[in-house]
Amino acid sequence: MGSVLALSSSPGHQNWPFSTDPPPSRWDAHPAHWDSPPRWERRDGRLPNPGSFHSLHRSCKDVFPQQIEGVKMIVNKTLSSFFKVSHTLHLSAVSPSYYRFHVEHLQSDDYSKDKDAPALIGEMDSSGSLNAHALLHLTERVRARTVFQTQQSQFVTWQFETEYRGNDFTAAVTVANPDVLRESVILVAHFLQSVSSGLVLGGELVYHRGRAEEGGILTLAGQYSRPNWVATLNAGKGGAHASYYHRANKQIQVGVEFEASTRTQETTTSFGYQMELPEANMVFRGMINSRCIIGGVLEKRLTPLPATLIMGAFVNHRGDKLQVGLGVNVG
C-alpha cells in the first residue's frame, strides 16, 4: 500500500497521461529493499515468501512509460554512503511548475548487508508540501513503516504500517488517518500465502469509519509466476485489476493491464513494452490503451557524462491533445 490517498481513487488511473493530478513523487514508490527478490530465484525446495501486497503488479507497471511533460531537470548527489539528496525543477505550461528537494538517509548502499538499518526519506516542494516516511526492521521478520503527508500547512495523511513475513506468507496491517475528535479511521489488512512455487493467493480488506459513514471493501488477489512471465488478478466490490508481464528476451519486455472500476463505471485496457539497447545506452518504453492514448519515453545515457537525457510524447487521439516533455537526469 502506498499512500492512503490511493484508497479514495480508482486504481491505476491517477497516473494516466492528460490527467489533472500532479505527477507522483518518488516517495510513493517503495525502495527496492522493501520487497523480496523474484520468487523463482529460490531453489531450496521450500515455498518462498510471496513479498508485499502492493508489489503484485509492479513487474507489469515498470514496463509502462512514466508521463513526462514540459521541461524537467533532476540533479542527484551522493554525499556519503548513507546520505543522498536530489533536486528537481519542473517547468510546465499545463500544470503548476515546482521545485522539489528529496533526501534519503540509509545505513548502507547495500541494504541487504544491514537488515536492522532504518531508512529515512523526506521530500519538500516549493509550495511547502512535505512527504516523509521511515522504514525500520524491528526484527528479522517484522518491518514497520510510518508515512506523513502535508498539503502546504495542513496534514492530509498520517499512517502506520506493520508487516510480518513468514517463510511462505506475508501479513500486514495499516492504520491511516486516525482522528479521535472526528471519530474516523481507515484500517487496511493484507495477507498473501504461497500455495506453490509459482502460485500466490491472498486478499486485502479496507475498513473506513467516520461520523457520517462506515463501510468496508474486500479484494481477493492471485498471482501465478514463471521465470519469464507473471499473471496477476485483483477482484472485489470496487472493481478488478488484471495484469500480465512477459520478458521475451534480455532486450524486450511487454505488459498488458486491464482495469475496471465499479465506482466510475469505466474500463481500461493498456499495452506497454520496454526495449533496451545496451550498445547504444538507450531504453525505450511505449504504451497504447483503449482510451486512444499513445505514448513513449526514450532514455539515453550520455556517456561519459553522468547524465541521462529523457524525451517523451503522449498523444490523446480522442481528446485531440498532445504532451511533449524533455528532461535531464544528472548523477
Image (tube, rainbow, N blue to C red):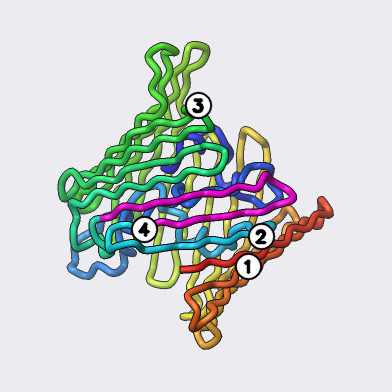
- The residue to which callout 4 is attached is 84
The percent coordinates of residue 3 (x first, y second) are 45, 39
- The residue to which callout 3 is attached is 154
Say whether residue 238 is left or right of residue 44: right
The percent coordinates of residue 89 (x first, y second) are 58, 55
- The residue to which callout 1 is attached is 297
Query: Image point 39% across, 29% down: which residue?
Result: 176
Counting labels gives 4
- In reply to whether residue 91 is colored magenta, the answer given is yes
Q: CA distance from mark 3 to mark 2?
A: 29 Å
Residue 113 shows which numbered tag? none
Can residue 17 be seen from the camera position used here?
A: yes
Q: Which residues are magenta?
A: 85-106
N-terminal-most mark, 1 or 2: 2
Query: Image point 61% across, 59% down: which residue?
Result: 72
Circle 4 packing at 10 Å, graded few (<14), some (14-19), many (20+), is some
Q: CA distance from mark 2 to mark 4?
A: 23 Å
What SS does tag 1 mark? strand
What SS does tag 2 mark? strand
N-terminal-most mark, 1 or 4: 4
Circle 2 packing at 10 Å, graded few (<14), some (14-19), many (20+), is some
What SS does tag 4 mark? strand
Predominant secondary structure in magenta? strand
N-terminal-most mark, 2 or 4: 2
From the viewer's perspective, is the residue at label 1 or at label 2 nearer?
A: 2
Q: CA distance from mark 3 to mark 4?
A: 27 Å
Mark 2–mark 4 CB contact (< 8 Å): no
- The residue to which callout 2 is attached is 71
Q: What residue type is disc 2 on?
A: Val
